[in-house]
Structure formats: C-alpha cells, structure tokens
Image (cartoon, rainbow, N blue to C red):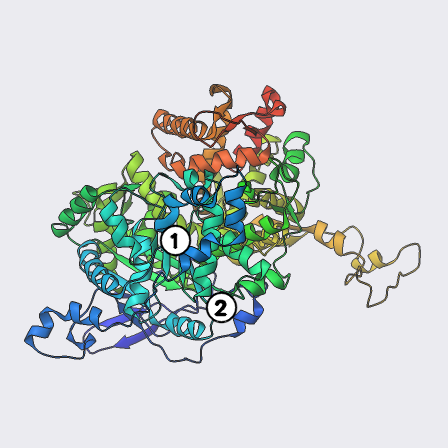
Amino acid sequence: MLHEKNDGKDQDVILPLIQQNRPALSWDIKIKKRVKAPCLGKFRPIVGQCCHQCTPDSLRKKPGQTTFLGFHNLLSINETDTRYRGWLVRRVCCALFVSGRKVYPSPVGNRHESVCQSNRVKEALTAPEGGDDRGQLSHLSPLVGLINTCISPGYLRFLSWVMLKMFSCVFGSVIVNLNHLPALHRASQEGSPLVYVYVRQSAADCALIPLVLFCHNLRVPYTVCPLHITSSLIRSLLQKVGVILLPPSAPTEQDAEIDSLYSPVMTSLARELLHEGQAMSVGVSAESGRGGRWLAHITQLIKEGSVPDVSLVPVSISYDCVPEANAQVGLSSVFRWMWSGLWRRPAGGVWVHFAQPFSLKEMCASGRCRVDEWLPLQDLLLPVILNNRTECVFGQRRMSWLLPSSHYASELPEPPRHPERDLGIAVVLHLIFSAASCTTVMSTSLVSSLLLYRHRKGVSISALCRDIVWLTEELLFRNKDVGFGGAFEDVVRSSLSLLAPHLIIAAVPSRRDFSIAPRPSLAASLHLAAQAQIVTHTFILEAVGACAVSAMLCEVVRSGVSSRLRSSGVDGEQVNGDMEFNVLLGQSELTEKALHLCHLLPPGFMPPCQSSQSFALDAVDSLVRCGILIMEEIPRDVPLCDFLKKEGALNWTTSDDPYHSDSDCDVEEQDLRSYKISQPSQCPEMLFFLCRMLAGHMRALCWATSCLDLLPTPLPEAEFVAQMHSHLCDAADQKKRHYESCSEEAAHTAVRSLIDLGVLTEERRKGGGGGGGGVFLGVGSLFQLPENRQKLQRFMSQYLFN
C-alpha cells in the first residue's frame, strides 16, 4: 500500500516501511514521476537492539523517549547551535559551538604507578630474568607514553574544531540518529563505563566516534588506534586527547603483541581506565580478528572481578565512499592530506548508528552465551568432503583465530580448549554481528549490489531505477535502515556520480536513457564489492538458501536426470512460455546443503547465538516466504491415520516426556516434505541474483584450493597469504573478470578457512624468519593426495553459481 501526500504541486509517493499481504520479492514495481525515499520520515526501522537470548535484561532497559527526535548533521553548524546571535557569530559559530561543549577531563594522576604495581605487570617483569627493580622498570620505558595517555580539555576542543573543518572538506554530511543518544546518556549515568566497539573500515573511524560523542555532550572515550604514527609531534598531540597508540617500535598490532610486556600492561591500563569511569573505543577487524585482544582484556577483568561491569555499545559507520588511508602516518602525510582536502569537493556522506548498550557481566555470568557446541571446522565438514557422509555433524564453527592463543600464557601451541578464550571469541562475534546488523545501507551500496549481482553486463538507467526502488522496499521490509532521502532521481544521480570512476556510462543514440555497466578492472570490482557487502548481509538467509538450491540442481544435472519443460507451446527446440524444473527438492537434503555452507561463512553474517542448524532451516524457509520455492507434499501410499497404527495398537506417551514430539510420525513428516521451484517469470533471475551474492567468497575458496600444489610450502604465514593473494589476482587477470574474489580480505578469509579445515597445518618455529611471528603454513598430509584435493574442489565448487 502506498501513502500519498499532495502538496498542491507534485504528488510524492513514499514507500511504506511496513508492508503486509504482499509477496516479499516482487519485481514488478512501477516508477512514479517522483519517488521519495522514506529514510527521513518518522516511521523508521528499529535497529541496534541487543540480543534477546544472551542479554534479555539489557534488552528491557529501553529509554522512555517515544517521540521522534530526528537526525543531526554534525557538519551543519550555525548560530542556532550557540548561545549568541549576530553577523560575527555566523562566521565563528563552529569555534563557539566547540567551546560550549561539555568536556570530562581525565588527568593521568598516579596511573603509571598503579600499572607498574599491578600483579600481572610484576609477573611479566620478573618472568624472563631477574635484576633490580630499576632495571626491570626500564623495560617499561617504551610503554610509558601509552600509560600516560590523558584527555586535556584545551587540546580536545582544538582538535575537535580541526576535525569538523577537515571532515566538512571530505564528507558532505555526517548524520547521527538522535533517537539512539538517550540510551547512551542513561547508560553513562548508571555508573558502568561505556565501551564502544566498531568494525574497522578506515582511519576516519577512530576520529568519528569521539567527535560525535563530544558534539553531543557525552564522555569522549579513550580510543585504541591501530595506525603506526611515526611523527613524535602527532603522537604527543593524540595522546593528549585520549588516543592509545601502538608502541613506537611496533609497526603493526601483531608486532606489538609479540612483546611479552604489551599484553599485561594494556590489561592493567584498561583496568585503571575503567576504574576511573572512563569510556573506551575499540575497533575490531572481521577478517583477521585484530582488536579482539582489547575486548579479551576487558572480559578477563570482568571474570576476575577487577571491574564490576561495563556496557558494550556496538557502533556502525556507513560511508558512501570509504576514505583511503595509509597504515603509517607521518607529519608530511598529514599535511598532504590536509592540503588536498582544501581543494577537494565533499564526496558522499557518513551515517553513524549507536546500538543499544548491553551488560558484559550479564553475558559472561548468566551462562546464556553458550559456546559448548563449538567444533573445529574439520570435524564439521571433513567427513562430508572426504567420505561423502550423508548425516550431518551438528555444531557451530569455532573461529579461534579471532583471538590469538598467545593471549593466554597457560595455553600450549595446540590447546584442547580454553573456556575464557571461547567466551572472549563469543563476545567478539556478537559485537561484529551487532555492528553489521545496525549498519545503514547507503545508496551507493544499492547501486553496487545491483550492478555486480544482477546487471553485470550493463543496464539502462530506467531499469536500474526500478530495481533500486524494489531493493529499497525489500531492505525496509527486513527492518534495515537506509542512509538516503529526498527526491529519488536526485538519490540515483548522486550515487552514480560517487561511483562514476568505477562505472562505464554510455549513451545510445537510439534510446532516450543511457546505459551503465561496472568497469571491468580490479579497483572498480573491489570498490563495488566492498560497498555491496552490507546488502549481502541483509539477504544472507536468502543467499544461503539459493546457493543450496543451486548445489542440489547441479547434483541433478550431474546424475543424468533431465528436467522436464512445460510450456504453452513447443516448436522444435524453441520453448515458449515459462520454464519449469519439474524437480522435487527434499527438505532434509536442502537443509543439509545450507548447513554445510553456513560453516564456510565469514564472521558477522550469522548470529553467533543461533545454532547453524536453525540458521539453515531459516534459510530454506526464507525462499518459501519470498516465493522462490513452493512447498509440496509427496503423495502417500498409506493414509495418514494408518501411520499411527503399529501392529494394531497405538503407542501412548506422557505429556511431560522431554523426548515426546507432537506425533509419532514427525520424522516421517519432514522426510515427506519437499519443495519445487516456483514459476513466476522472474524467479530464475531472482535465484541467480541471490546466488551471485556469495559467489565472490566461494570463488576465492575454489581458487585458493586449486593453487595449493603451486605454492612452495611450508612458508611463513604472512608470505603464504601474500602469495595466495597474488595467485587470486593472477586467476582473475587470466579470466578478465571476477576481480571481487581477489581482495586481500578474500585471501585472508580463504587461508583461514583452509587452516580450520585441516588442509593447511600450522607449525610454530622458534626463531623462524619471515612474517607471521614464526608460524609456518604447509599442506597437511591428508590433502597432499590429489584425489582428496579434487574432492575438496568439488565440494567448494558446488556452491559456486555459474
């Protein structure tokens, strides 16, 4: 149903937020003359709620504010934001606004002494070798600057003013949802320190969160920055505004964590900051797990009782165009960036969402966050890959690489299991998924996903607009927020201008509208794939189910069973009408295919508190809801009532029997349930669109598997990943397409999956050269056999839509 408003001039059509009694994936949507995206209306999706299973008590703590507060553009500062008015105020309103913000100063005090006197730091100092106290404390000298990080009001106001000016040159807007801020104010008043957690995308993430909180009179957090700052002047300035940097001698986080003193000092520093009531901001990397150590430090403090409780706040940051940044930042690079920003036109916008805070103590102490069903990936999939076993091993993939084992000194190189580590990994997974779930979908994400997964060979602008309207409607139907508004033609024009360097736009003389196609290059494909990832996250259930259907259809083709075509008329080889696959897909087989694919998904796509079996069942059901599959019942040879008769007698069970089911033939009922592909004219195209969403990830796994015999193993881990990345790029260059499968993130994810499968083995060598901290990767003995590698290749390629 469409809500229409008539302002006397035009008739604006606003897409509804809640749509009922309609097929969920309908393509036939007519474009009106003027369409308005519903993102700035009062009826918006409620995003960012904490988990109802792991933190139900925190979920009940909702703010009393029920009115719509709207949105705030952080860069739109005028005289109304100050206490003064006048001609001069309009020219210095930004400085007046910054000077009027509330600042919570955080002096160093005796923090250095408290950190040095902590038991974990003393044990780390005395562990290697003895010596006097002065010699032992000399080992802490590289970390003194980190310990003495503070928040100075004067420096904070000055740097906030500078960042507001610089961001106004880079971004067109920085939008904050004001409806999320009352929960943060209330949580900060309850006494528990706030810990903001975001998924790393750019160096701008570290600056955006403190700037947003500063502009709304919230406590500015101590920000963990993963960049390597080489300039001593910049390091000194950042350490006075609460930025916790890496040690000067460590170019990366991995190098810093090799130091035996770094981990205990950072744990003690986190303890002192939380005891002072300070807030913290931590970024987590989904592909490498970097940043999870800080969350492990905080979880460890909660478990041992050093800190009563903290409130975790997942934060999502959405960019129209993610700004690029170097890993190393020096004084010259900062000046070059500032100089280029003065001549650069603002490009795109940023949306910041703060999810609902939840108690970390509740998650740790209640036991609701269950990790007892976690199994290694090789236990879940190797029996199916090598032995072609039909029955599934139920469990959830253990992603131990999200938290390196060296964090726990008591662990061996191959630990059987560590409960604290499993809990820390569960917290990291929850936060990655929560941040991704409340991420706003930008207009560039819609265009990128449609061009990559639906119109790879090009599309006219009118057809693209129709599909964008449909996709926007589907996102809102799935309770996903969108980050654009206004007249729809302006939204499409803006997104195309932002993506113009990665598109081919051609005008056809015989047609009124022009055609658009993605540029077939590495940079363009990687950029579009990164923008489209949030759309894949929204449709992950349908994508997993579609890939499972595609895998089963491939089995039908390989088995030699031909599909029957029904049509309104057949003339020779020409088929008129809709094509129908007269193939029944059993529920158990389809769910099994979806379950196997679930284990191969990267972190952040699947809810960590939901079992993989339940997720696979939901994936199959989602295809029924959207009209791709139709449920059918296989005709019975025996009437249903006869199933209850067993040798002339009925079997009775008590109602309180825990193993009692609703009927004695439940298992047979599920075995008799089947599906077939529906017959709308656009259904195959819809199925292909969903399959292509995971094709890049699965293709990277296939290419990585095929190159195992080409790499001279064993190799250091960093060198192995680099050579794997080079092989993926070579494979894409050879085919002149599928460049989205050869990113650095795809190489990291593929190598990690092969390690978890047991295809690659890790060997720790003391004093070993090369990267990876002495960890060498080699092909396991089981997969040195060509037939086993072929089985693995067939298993991976069955989900690859071609």
Residue 679 can be seen in this image:
no
In the rendered structure, which amino acid carries the disc numbered 1? Ile
Nearer the observer, 507 or 384:
384
Q: Quick check: 366 left or right of 360?
A: right
Q: Which residue is mark 2?
A: 21
Query: Quarter of the image containing the N terminus?
Result: bottom left
Residue 235 picture location, percent across and down: 27, 49
Asked which secondary structure carries label 1, the reply is helix
Question: Is the Cβ of the residue at disc 1 closer than 8 Å to that at disc 2?
Answer: no
Q: Which residue is mark 1?
A: 147
Give the distance between the C-alpha atoms of the residues marked 1 and 2, in whole angstroms. Answer: 59 Å
In the rendered structure, which amino acid carries the disc numbered 2? Asn
Mark sitting earlier along the chain (1/2): 2
**Residue 160 figure quarter:** bottom left
Residue 731 picture location, percent across and down: 39, 26
Instruction: Say which residue appears at 65% left-offset and 30% top-offset.
Output: 386
As drawn, the residue found furthest toward the front would be 132
As drawn, the residue found furthest toward the left would be 87
Nearer the observer, 491 or 274:
274
Counting other residues with Cα less than 10 Å from the Cα at mark 1, is it few (<14), some (14-19), or many (20 or more)? many
Asked if residue 716 is positioned above or below residue 449 in the image, the reply reads above
